[in-house]
Amino acid sequence: MTFPDWTPDDFRRHGYEVVDWIADYLARVEDLPVISRVEPGDIRAMLPPRAPEEAEPFDAVLADLDRVILPGITHWQHPGWFAYFPTGASPPSILGDLVSSGLGVVGFLWATSPAATELESQVLDWLVDLLDLPQGWKTTGPGGGVIQMSASDATHLAFVVARHRRHETPVEQMVVYASAEAHSSVVKGARVAGVRHVRPLAVDEELAIVPAAFEAAVVADLEVGRTPLAVVSTVGTTGTTAVDPVRPIGEIARRHRLWHHVDAAYAGTAMICPEFRHHQDGLELVDSYVFNPHKWMLTNFDCSAFWVADRRPLIDAMSIMPPYLRNAASESGQVIDYRDWHVPLGRRFRALKLWFVLRAYGAEAIRAMVRSHVELARGLAARLEADPRFELVAPVPFSLVTFRHVAGDRATDDLAAALNASGDVYVTPSHLDSGSFIRVSIGQRTTEARHVERLWQLIDDLAPPARSAG
Ligand SMILES: *Cc1c(COP(=O)(O)O)cnc(C)c1O
């Protein structure tokens, strides 16, 4: 050895210790307070100012996981996690990530590890069938799927491809359209792509895009010489899981040559169950689509699945071939080189964890999980609706419940703060023009009826009567 490295046996011993540590963590996470209670700077204050010059025993490192790191962890895998959206995490996925690290390959070209590319293509083709996406999106058709780091990257990429396709047009004239309720990554992605104009579109009472408002905005921009570039339909907005009407938006987009991107970051997972697919009717009128297995499909961050209906404009926009990357397989045209499907060159073998998840659980178990979360959400929504102290803010098409206290913003904000101070649950306080509300997102792998029951008990105990001054 050229330096004092670990032997394979050192790795084996410490590896077992780490797996034991994670298994113990998963077994006890429910007993920890969901939200970390440290103050800013507390964690750094426990860390030495300089990196060690000498090797430390690994036991000391592991001990510091408990002493230093855990107090600063907010437990996304706690069954009382009702904040934001869930983070996908599961034992098979953790092990898939471990194997990816163990192999340590960087599969930017097919030739740099054929299995990394071919497994990714195959697993994303499987998902086309599992979510009933258009068959042409498979890598065996004109389209294809690729794993991106995040939905934000995918949406940014869609704009870059749309912009490249219209490269004869000055970027200053280009306009992107999305619901006023769309995720912040739309505005950010447009900004990073150099597109200055983002039109927030009017929404109806269910917070979905009004197609006529979209077309009117496009026509108004055309009249002043701008170039409508792309539109985003969100299936399951972050605020309230509102669903934009994909088909009419797609028809308008076709008429005016806009790129049509669908952001189903959270709700895409539900499409594994046929009963939710009507929410994305019209996908044959879509140019690109993203959903996050790392949200609701049991797969650890990062794993964002992105498809294009036609891969040529994507590769046109992303492919640059320097001499040192030339190789016979690429030149044969018979392989996919995923470096041409996103911005970075290097890429991790992320398909492994998705493959582990799909095989270790099977689609039926994932459907059962989705249905149980949706059922729990509907049960909670029904209780809130039946109680005169509360009103629902939006429909519950998936497993996010949004509600407020009828006494007003103060009562609603105070209730959210009191719930989160309990240590047992974590909800997200949010705000619309109509006022404050509370988001309860049910989707953590281990969340069962008893955890939602505990949440309801807390809501019931902590909420003031309906007539209390707000
Ligand atoms: C969570 C979310 C995103 C962002 O996902 P990242 O993968 O973290 O970038 C984008 N869009 C919607 C609708 C989301 O809910």
Image (cartoon, rainbow, N blue to C red):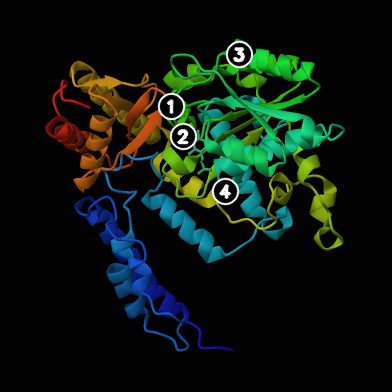
Label 3 crowd (10 A; few <14 / some 14-19 / many >=20) = few
**Which residue was labeled with disc 2?**
266
**Which residue was labeled with disc 1?**
241
Numbered circle sitting on residue 191: none
Q: Is residue 304 above or below residue 205?
A: below
Label 2 crowd (10 A; few <14 / some 14-19 / many >=20) = many
Can residue 311 be seen by looking at this rendering?
A: no
Q: Which residue occupies 23% across, 37% down? A: 414
Numbered circle sitting on residue 213: 3
Residue 367: x and y in percent read: 39, 30
Q: Are marks 1 and 2 in contact (CB under 8 Å)?
A: yes
Kind of residue indicated by mark 3 = Ala
Kind of residue indicated by mark 4 = Met
Toward the viewer: 310 or 39?
39
- Left-right relation of 196 to 92: right
Residue 324: x and y in percent read: 83, 63
Q: Earlier in the sequence, mark 1 or mark 3?
A: 3
Q: Are marks 1 and 4 in contact (CB under 8 Å)?
A: no
Q: In whole angstroms, how far apart are the C-alphas of marks 3 and 2?
A: 25 Å
The quarter holding residue 434 reads top left
**Which residue was labeled with disc 4?**
149
Q: Which residue occupies 20% across, 36% down? A: 455
The quarter holding residue 382 reads top left
Toward the viewer: 117 or 466?
466
At mark 2, the secondary structure is loop
Q: Earlier in the sequence, mark 3 or mark 2?
A: 3
Q: Is residue 350 above or below residue 411?
A: below
Q: In whole angstroms, how far apart are the C-alphas of marks 4 and 2?
A: 15 Å
At mark 4, the secondary structure is loop
At mark 1, the secondary structure is loop
Residue depth check, mark 1 versus mark 2: number of the one nearer the observer: 1
Q: Earlier in the sequence, mark 1 or mark 4?
A: 4
